[in-house]
Every structure is written in structure tokens, then in C-alpha cells.
């Protein structure tokens, strides 16, 4: 289905949550949380949303703050409010999907709203290079200058950003490695091999309970912008998801060089595997007999797992 913009009123508040939803009927749903000063349309979430949909996963990404008049303002927010918004998003998706399995994926500082929210109503957790305890001890590797008139800090994190005192004060009350112990769900932790959070990723892993996996993405910076680190991050994350929270549905686009898009098949639809299998066999046989090139977004061998 096409991507849909969603606006959710925040209870007892003048503000709304702005999000984008890609739905695959009957599939698990992945909720993506952005990091410090980012938004739902940061490149990692923007790209991975499309990959997830093709692999048969619904996904929802949203911004904790934004430019709309009825969105929260970054300088006035706290991590608790981010966690509250995550709660409202999960409640919305659980209702909309008839209680489908739900995975929360966070990047960087997005780990803190997840930890504050806690494990309820979550089936699996993905942490991409999660922020560490330096934010909670006031020792984050960024310089800050107090501006009394604004009741905020001028923080240099690549560019200068105004960060509300309430947010930084709240972060300093958190104990992330203790909080992760409460999550007994399966956990996947991806660490940027060339980033500054490698040690903290190991600590998250060591303090985690239950089924867990830590993978190092080589030559990756914190934003996974170097070389093919983003592609490797997506591939490894998706591989883990498919093992731990498999989708009964994945999509396959058939295209030809001349005519472009032909049709989209759902060969893993659990309700009619045999019929879909026969349809795909007939389709592929026809195109082979015509000796016309046809490309499928998945390998041909993977189209008929029931044979």
C-alpha cells in the first residue's frame, strides 16, 4: 500500500504526532524512533521503511517534534514526553492492526524514549548504535553553553542547537544499562564499528537478558553514512527480523526492462500459498517461453518455499 501520512492527537495536549505509515496487511509492524535533532524522514528511516515494506513488514515512523504549529517544539520537550508519544503510537497501531506483533527500532538518542516506555506491548527491540550513559551523567561528547534568557543550553553537535534544560535534566536521571534489563524480548544491537559508542553497545548487550545479538557494522560512523555501511545495516537488521519475528507476507515486484512495473505478488500470503505458488510458476514459465527478460525483486528460488 502507498505511504500514508498520519496525524494523531496527543491526549490532554494541544499538540499532535505527525507520522508516516506503510501497511502490509497481516504483517508485523516496525515502529522507528529517530535520534537527537533528527526527524522521521532522516535517511536511515526513510530508506529502511521501503525495504521493510518490500520484505513484508508494516512500518510507522514519526517525529517527536517538528515545524508544524501543533507539533511539539524541540526546545520545550523532555524524553518522558517522547516516551508518552511512543505509547500513543503503539496504542494506535495495536488497535489498527488487530494486535499484530510490534517491533520498536531506535537509533542513537531514540533509545531513551524506548527505555522509559518500557517493554509493555513490544515483541522485539532493535537498537542502532544507541546513545550511552554520558547523556545521563552530563558528560556527553558535545560542548554546551548555558543561556539564561532562554532557559536552554547552546549545544554544539555538528551544528549549534538549542536544547531545553528540562530535556538534559531528565536524561541525567536515567540509568540506561539498568533499564535495558527489564526488556526480556529478543534484542538486536547494531554498533557502528568506527563510532564512539562501540563500548556502550557492548554494555547494552552485556546487561540485556533473553535472546540477544550484537553485530558490529565495520567502517561505520554513528549515522551509518560511510561506504556501504547503511546497506549492511539494513541487510543484517532485516535478516535478524526475519528469523525472530518472521512476516507471513512479503511482497515481490515483477518488472521488465521495456514495460517497467508488471505486478506485485504476495507469495508468502499464508491464506493461499498453493494458489500463489501456481500463479507464480505459470507466470515465470510464460516469460521464459517468450524469452523475454523479467526481473523479480527476490530470487526465483525463494518464490516457492512450499514446493
Image (cartoon, rainbow, N blue to C red):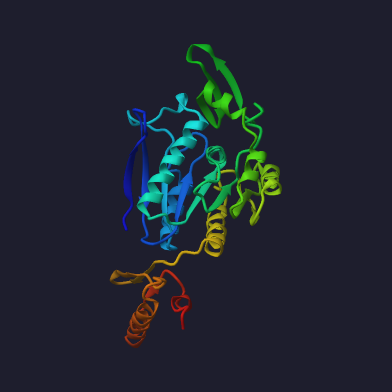
Point 46% across, 35% down: residue: 84
Residue occupying the far bottom of the picture: 289
Most foreground residue, 256 or 298? 298
Q: Position of residue 245 (x, y in %)?
A: 52, 61
Most foreground residue, 185 or 267? 185
Q: Is residue 117 found left or right of 39 in the rendered image?
A: right
Count the labels in the image.
Answer: 0
Most foreground residue, 12 or 203? 12
Point 59% across, 29% down: residue: 171
Q: Position of residue 89 (x, y in %)?
A: 41, 43
Point 64% across, 51% down: residue: 219
Which quadrant would residue 261 be assigned to in this image? bottom left
Point 52% across, 53% down: residue: 123
Q: Is residue 261 found left or right of 220 in the rendered image?
A: left
Q: Position of residue 288 (x, y in %)?
A: 36, 85
Q: Quadrant of the N terminus?
A: bottom left
Tell me if residue 76 comes above or below residue 301 in the rendering: above
Q: Is residue 99 found left or right of 194 in the rendered image?
A: left
Tell me if residue 25 comes above or below residue 257 in the rendering: above
Residue occupying the far left of the picture: 259
Q: Is residue 223 found left or right of 247 in the rendered image?
A: right
Which quadrant would residue 129 be assigned to in this image? top right
Q: Position of residue 175 (x, y in %)?
A: 65, 34
Residue occupying the far top of the picture: 149
Tell me if residue 30 comes above or below residue 136 in the rendering: below
Which quadrant would residue 180 be assigned to in this image? top right
Amino acid at each position: 500500500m502507498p505511504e500514508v501520512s498520519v496525524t494523531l492527537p496527543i491526549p490532554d495536549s494541544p499538540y499532535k504526532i505527525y507520522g508516516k505509515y506503510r501497511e502490509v496487511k497481516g504483517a508485523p509492524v516496525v515502529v522507528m524512533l529517530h535520534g537527537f535533532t533528527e526527524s522521521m524522514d532522516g535517511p536511515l528511516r526513510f530508506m529502511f521503511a521501503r525495504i521493510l515494506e518490500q520484505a513484508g513488514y508494516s512500518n510507522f515512523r514519526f517525529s517527536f517534534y517538528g515545524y508544524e504549529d501543533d507539533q511539539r517544539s524541540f526546545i520545550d520537550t523532555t524524553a518522558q514526553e517522547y516516551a508518552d508519544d511512543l505509547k500513543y503510537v503503539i496504542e494506535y497501531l495495536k488497535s489498527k492492526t488487530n494486535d499484530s506483533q510490534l517491533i520498536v527500532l531506535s537509533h542513537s538518542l531514540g533509545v531513551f524514549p524506548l527505555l522509559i516506555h518500557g517493554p509493555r506491548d513490544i515483541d522485539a527491540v532493535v537498537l542502532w548504535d544507541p546513545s550511552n550513559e554520558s547523556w545521563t551523567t552530563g558528560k556527553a561528547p558535545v560542548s554546551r553553553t548555558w543561556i539564561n534568557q532562554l532557559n536552554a543550553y547552546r549545544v554544539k553537535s555538528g551544528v549549534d542547537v538549542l536544547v531545553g534544560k528540562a530535556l538534559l535534566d531528565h536524561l541525567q536521571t536515567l540509568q540506561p544499562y539498568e533499564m535495558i534489563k527489564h526488556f526480556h524480548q529478543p534484542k538486536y544491537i547494531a554498533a557502528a564499528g568506527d563510532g564512539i559508542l562501540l563500548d556502550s553497545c557492548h554494555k547494552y548487550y552485556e546487561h540485556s537478558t533473553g535472546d540477544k545479538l550484537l553485530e558490529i557494522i565495520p567502517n561505520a560512523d554513528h549515522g551509518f553514512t560511510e561506504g556501504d555501511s547503511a546497506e549492511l545495516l539494513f541487510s543484517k537488521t532485516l535478516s535478524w527480523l526475519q528469523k525472530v519475528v518472521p512476516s507471513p507476507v512479503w511482497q515481490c515486484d515483477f518488472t521488465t526492462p521495456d514495460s517497467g512495473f508488471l505486478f506485485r505478488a504476495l507469495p508468502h500470503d499464508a491464506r493461499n500459498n498453493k494458489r500463489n505458488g501456481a500463479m507464480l510458476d505459470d507466470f515465470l514459465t510464460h516469460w521464459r517461453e517468450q524469452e523475454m527478460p523479467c526481473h523479480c525483486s527476490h530470487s526465483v528460488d525463494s518464490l516457492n518455499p512450499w514446493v
